[in-house]
Amino acid sequence: MKEDSKEDLRENPKEVPKEERELRGQIIGGSISEILIREKAGAGLELGELLIVKEPGKSTILKVVDLRFGSQISPQNIELVSGMWLEEKADFEFMEPDLRNYRMALAKLMVTVKGREASISKSLPGFFSEVYSIRKEDLSFLGKPSNALFVGNLRSGSREIEVPVFLPGHKVLSHHILIAATTGRGKSNLTKCMLWDCAGKDYAGILVLDPHDEYYGRNGTGLKDIKAHMPESSANPVVYYTSSNPPPGAKSLRISLDTLRPEHFDGVFPWSEPQRGALYAYYNEYGTNWIKAIITEEKISNMKDFNEATIGVLRRRMQGLLRIRPSVKKEGQPREIVCRGIFSEEAGRTTVSDIVNRLEEGKIVVVDTSHFEGSIEILIGSIISHEIFSRYKRYKTDGTLNRKPVISIVLEEAPRVLGKEILEKGPNIFSQIAREGRKFKVGLWAITQLPSLIPRQILANMNTKIILGMEMAPERQAIIESASQDLSSENKSIASLDVGEALITSNFARFALPVKIPPFEEFAGKSGSSNSDSPNPQDRSGPSEKVRNSFAGVM
Amino acid sequence: MKFAHLADCHIGSWRDDRLRAIPIEAFRRACDISLKEQVDFILISGDLFNTALPEIPSLNATIAKMRELVDAGIRFYIIPGSHDFSYSGRTMLEVLESAGLAVNVAKQESVSEDGKLKLKFTVDEKTGAKITGLLGRRKGLEGSYYELLDRESLEKEDGFKIFMFHSAIEEYKPKNLALMESIPLSLLPKNFDYYAGGHVHVVFNTQEENYGRIAFPGPLFPNDFSELEELKGGGFYIYNNGNLEFRNIQVHNVESMSFDCSDLTPQEIKAKVLEEVEKKEFINTIVTLRFSGRMRSGSIRDIDWNAITETLYEKGAYFVMRNSSHLQSPDFEEIKAEVGSSKQIEDNIIKEHLGQMKELGLTPEQEFSIVKELIEALDDEKQDGETKSSFENRILSKLQGWTERELKADLKSSSN
C-alpha cells in the first residue's frame, strides 16, 4: 500500500489534531464491545494500557484487554519459515518485516470525553483512527470530588501516570468497600494508604479491627506517625486500643461485662435455638449482670424450660471465650467472678461508647486484636458495631444523621462474618450493616482473599471493589459478576495485576479505574511534606520541631 | 507506712451557707480520724478548695485544722486540682505551702532540652516515701503534660513511691461520666506503689499489673444535687502497709426522693409528696426532691413548694433541695435541651457558642477549656473588708497569663 493513500482511508482525516504524541497503533476493526487495533511496530502495548483516540470535539479512551499476533503470511508459510529457521539454520529476512508481521490489541471502549465531561462510549471511534498513549492532561475530567479519598495513581498497563485517583469518600465508605487480593499483593499497603488519607478529615470515622497489629505502626511507620504531619493545633486523629502493654497515650483495651448483650454473640458462636433461648432468658432476668449469673450458676425462673446441658454449654463457652471463671465458693457469701482477659467487671465501662464517640468525631480507631483468637476479635467488632449501628439508626430517626460523619468498619478476612457458611446459621450485625448500613451512613470495608465465599447479594451491595492480583479464577469470577462496571473482558487484566496494581470498580467512578498504589512509607513521607502535588489533599506540615519549655502550674 | 488519701474536698463550694459549712466539717472529721489513726502523712489529690482563692471563713477553718495536724507531726502533700488550679499560679495552695502547712508535690526538676517534663520527688522525712504528681486542669488540659512526661526517670527511681494525680483514667470511668475528659492509663508512669487519684467523684480502687494500687476516694462531700442523690456522703482512704480501708464521712444523712408527676395536678403532686414525707423521719437530713413527668394541668409554680419544704423542716430536715428540670406543665412547649446540673447547662451553652475565637486558631476542645478557665477565674466576689480597687487588682492579677499572646504560646506548646 502506498503511503500517501493511507490518509484517504481515515474518517475526517483533516480534522485530526497534529500533536506530538506517541503513536501506539491504529483502529482496524472490531465492534462496540471490542476494538481491534494494529500495534505500531515497537510500541510494545501492554495488557491494561490506556489509549486515546482524538477526534474533532471528542476523545475516546480505550483500554487494552488482550494482545495477539497478526501476519500477512499464511499460517502454513509461517510454520514453514519457522521450520527453516529452526532446522535448516536458514539465514534470511522478511522484506519489510514490520509490515508483514505485527501485533494486534483488543481494546475496550471506556469513556468518551467532550470537554471536561465524560460519558460511557456509545459510538465507535473513526475507522483507521490513530491511537495514542494517554497523557495526564487527557484525564482532567477525573477531577477531585468533595471529601476526596485517595485510592492510588492512575495506571496505564504497568506505567504509573501522575494522576491521583480520588473517589467521593463519604459515598464510597457508606456504600461499602471490598478489597480483594491474594496474599502479598498489597491489601495492607492499600488499606494503610487509604487510612492515612482519611485521617484528620471530618467526613468519616473509621474503626479498624487489626488482627495483625500492622496499622498503628508500633514498630515502624504507621498511623501513629500522622500526628506529626498535622497542623499543630489539631487533635490526634488516630486512637489506638491494645491489650498488650499499651505505649504511652494508647488505651488499654478493656470491656466491661455489663456492656455485653446476647445479640453480640451472633456470628461468634453458632448457637442452637435452645442455647439462644437460654441466653435471652438470662439476659431478661438478670439484665446487665446476665453473664455473671451464667458463670456463677445462678438459676432462672423458667429453668425447667432448659436442659441442664444447654446451660452448661453456655457457661463453658462464656468462660473460655471471655476468660472469666467463678471465684471459689465461700460459705454465706455470694459467688464472684475472676476476670483474666480484656473483659472485666470494674474496668472498661465506657470503652465502647468512647470508641463510638471518637468515630463520631471523625477519628480512626485502631483496635489491636492480634493477641486474641478470631472469635474474640469478632465479638469485639460485634459489640462496637452494634453500638455504632443503633446510635446511627437513632440519629436517622431524630433527624440528626446528616450532621454525622460516615462510619466505616474495616474487617480483615471478611468471610469469617460475611461468608455463606456462617450466614446460613443466622444473620449478624455485619451482614445487617452490609444490607442496610448505607441508609444509616455506616459502611463496611471488607478485606478478603476469597470473595467467592461471600454471598452474591452482599457482594453486589459492596459498591466499590478494589481488586488487586488474584490468581484463582473462581475468585475473579465472583468479583467480575458483582462489579459496578462490566468487567467481563477484564479477566486477563485482573489475573495479570502485579503487586501494588489494582483495578477499581465503583458506582462512583465513570469507568473501572486501573491504579497503582504507592508504597505506604513513600506515600506517608510524601504527604507529610508541604509538596502541593502530593496526592493527599490535606494541608499537612512537616514534623514540628518546637520544644515546650513551660508547664503552667507545675512549680 | 500509714497515710490518708483525700481528694475533692471542694471547701467553699455550695452557695447556701448551711451546705457550704459541710465540706469544711467533712474535712475536719477526716483530719480528726487521720490524727486518731496516727497516719504518717495526708495526701490531698486536688481540689482541696473549690476555687483558687476561696473566701476567708472557709480558708480560716481549713488552715486552723491543718495547723493542728502539722503541729502533731502530720504533713500534708497536695496537688492543685481542676478547681483550685490557677493559670497564673496564684492560688491559696501557694499560701499554704509558704506557711509550711502543705507541700505541693507537682514540682519539676527541669525541662530537658527535648521538652520533656521531669518531675521532682518530694521525700517524706518520717517514712522515706517518695511523692510526686501532676496537677489537674479544666477539661483535661493536663493531658498534654502527661504526653511530655519523662516517665523513665520516674519509673526507675527506687523506694516506696506515690504518684498523685487529678485526672480521670479512661479505662475506669464510670458510665455516668462517660463524657468526662480523661487520660489513658498508659500515660501514668509505671512502677509506683500507690497512685493517689482525684477528680472523679466515685469511690474506686484497683490493682494493676506494672502500676500498683490505683485509688480514687471520691469527694469528702458531694458537690452537686446529682452527687448527693448518688453518693449520699463522702469519705477517704487510709493506706496501712498495703491494706486499703475506706472511711466514710457522713456529716448529715441524705434522703433522696423521686416523684413521677405524670398526669397529676399541682394539688395532687403536693398530696403525693406529703404522703411520702409523712412516712419518714428527716432529723438532721439533707433531703433531695426530684420531679419528672408531664403534669395534667396547671404550671410548675402552682405547686405549693412552701408547704412541702416547711413540712420537711418541721420534721427535722437540715436542708431541702428540689430539682424539677424534668417536670413539664401541659402547655409547656418542649425545647430540646439536655437539662442536667448547672455545670452541664453551662457546658452546653459554651458548646453552642464555640468557634467565635477564630483569631486564636483554637480547636473546639481548647476553646472550651479556655472559656471554662476564664469563667472560673472571674467567678469571684468582693470579700468583706476588701476595697473596690484591691478587688479589681486581685481579679486582674488572676488574669495574668491570659493575654492573647500568652494564650497562643501556651496552647501551641500544649498541642506539641
Image (spheres, coloured by chain):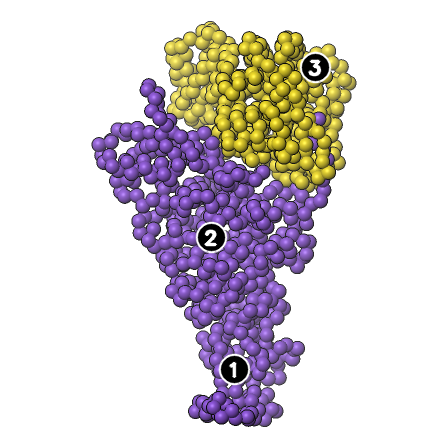
Tell me the crowding category of disc 3: few under 14, some 14 to 19, or many 20 or more residues within 10 angstroms, Cα based: some
| Residue underneath mark 2 | A445
Q: Both on one chain, marks 3 and 1?
A: no
What is the chain letter for disc 3?
B
Identify the amino acid type marked 2. Answer: Trp
Report how far apart the C-alphas of labels 3 and 2 lie in the structure.
Answer: 61 Å
Picture colour for chain B: yellow
Q: Is residue B81 left or right of residue A178?
A: right
Residue A170, compared with residue A82, is above or below; it is above
Q: Quadrant of residue A339?
A: top left
Query: Relative to B142, is A396 above or below?
Result: below
Q: Name the foreground residue: A132 vs A220.
A: A220
Nearer to us: label 2 or label 1: 1
Q: Looking at the image, is mark 3 or mark 1 nearer the viewer?
A: 3
Q: Are marks 2 and 1 on the same chain?
A: yes
- Residue name at image x 41 percent, y 43 percent: A376
Per the image, the residue denoted by label 3 is B100
Specify the subunit that label 1 lies on: A
Question: At x 38% / y 56%, what residue is drawn?
Answer: A454
N-term mark: 2 or 1: 1
Q: For mark 1, give the secondary structure.
A: strand
Instruction: Count how many numbered circles sit on residues in the image.
Output: 3
Q: Which chain is purple?
A: A
Which amino acid type corresponds to the residue marked 1 in the rendered image? Arg
Disc 2 and disc 1: Cα gap in Å? 41 Å
**Left or right: A364 as drawn, with respect to A452:** right
Q: Secondary structure at mark 2?
A: strand
Relative to A9, is B187 above or below? above
User: Mark 1 sits on what residue?
Assistant: A103
Callout 3, which amino acid? Gly
Q: Quadrant of residue A327?
A: top left
